[in-house]
Image (tube, helix red, strand yellow):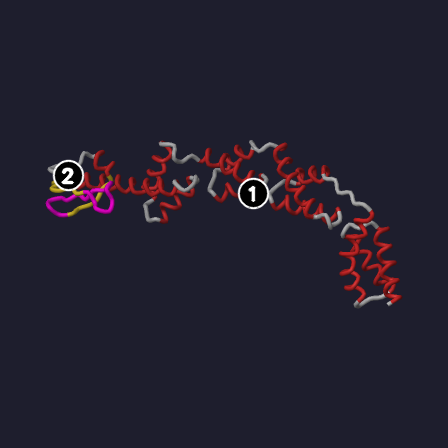
Amino acid sequence: MQVITKIGRQKNNAERYNIYLNDEYAFAVDEGTLIKFGLTKGKALERFDIDEITYEDEIAKAFNKALSFLSFQMRSEHEVKKKLLLAGHGEAVVLEAVRKLESLGFLNDATYSKALLETKKKTAKKGPRAIRQDLIKKGIDKGLQDEVLGSFSHEEQIEIAMGLAEKEVRAGSKKTPTQVKQKIQDVLMRKGYSFTVVGEVLEKISLEREDDEWEGMIEQQGEKIWRKFAAKLSGSERNMKVKQALYQKGFPIEVINRFIERKEIEDYDG
């Protein structure tokens, strides 16, 4: 049996105390652990008492480290566990610290997941599929993933996706409707929206072009295509290749024919 002969507050951390047994430094404890075990000068400790105290203090250190980690932003249980394990705490200690955090309301995967959903919707404009991937990375249980994503209504998805689509429409004023629609589809799929949502959004988007707009676009895009094929082909073979390339970009066949006629005249005059 050993006796506490001295308790001294640490100079660099006022909330931790050095414990001396039989006039020799033995271990340090958190203030909460000191109070919990009633550690005072003259108290006798058995070996199992010391083991219990040091184990409890290890939990306190992990708990405080987790609190500091959580002070910057919300975290999932998976993130906190990973952080504490990497810091060198044992698995049993980590589990106890996590239980304490949860009981005090500092850690809650349901609250965290809902907050993450709202953040990803509002700031990144992400759809359900992409948000699910974010939840998976954070170690969120599949059942909770389904529950949280179930609150992301179809109507809200359409509203957010429409905002993204309209942005692409504004940026694509010099592109054909086919090109703009392809860009919208690419963006929405990358953001994690379903084919159903993408299809509904594309149906709602109006991409009419006036004749002068078609002429301006084909002059800009067609010139590069014409030079590409004219460098190695001529006559009907060249014209067919140019026509196919422009048609794939969404240009109407009559606009393409007028463009090819103009280019043939220019080449002849040249």
| Mark 1 and mark 2: Cα distance apart in space | 57 Å
Q: Is residue 265 above or below residue 148?
A: below
Disc on the earlier residue, 1 or 2: 2
Residue visible at 28% across and 42% down in the picture: 58
Examine the image and state in which quarter residue 7 appears: top left
- From the top left corner, tell me how far across and down residue 157 is, in percent: 62, 36
Report which residue position mark 2 lands on.
45
- For the residue carrying disc 2, how many other residues have a C-alpha within 10 Å: few (<14), some (14-19), or many (20+)? some
Position in image of residue 264 (x %, y %): 87, 62
Residue 93 locus on image (x, y percent): 31, 41
Q: Which residues are magenta?
A: 9-24
Residue 120: quarter of image = top right
Say the numbered circle drawn on residue 37: none
SS label for mark 1:
loop
Q: Which residue is mark 1?
A: 124
Nearest to viewer (mark 1 / mark 2):
1
Identify which residue is drawn at 56% across, 42% down: 124
Which amino acid is tagged 2? Answer: Leu
Q: Answer whether residue 16 is magenta in the image.
A: yes
Secondary structure category for the residue under label 2: strand
User: Residue at coordinates 75% horizontally, 46% vertically from top-left?
Assistant: 177
Tell me the quarter of the image containing the C terminus: bottom right
Left or right of 200, for residue 126 = left
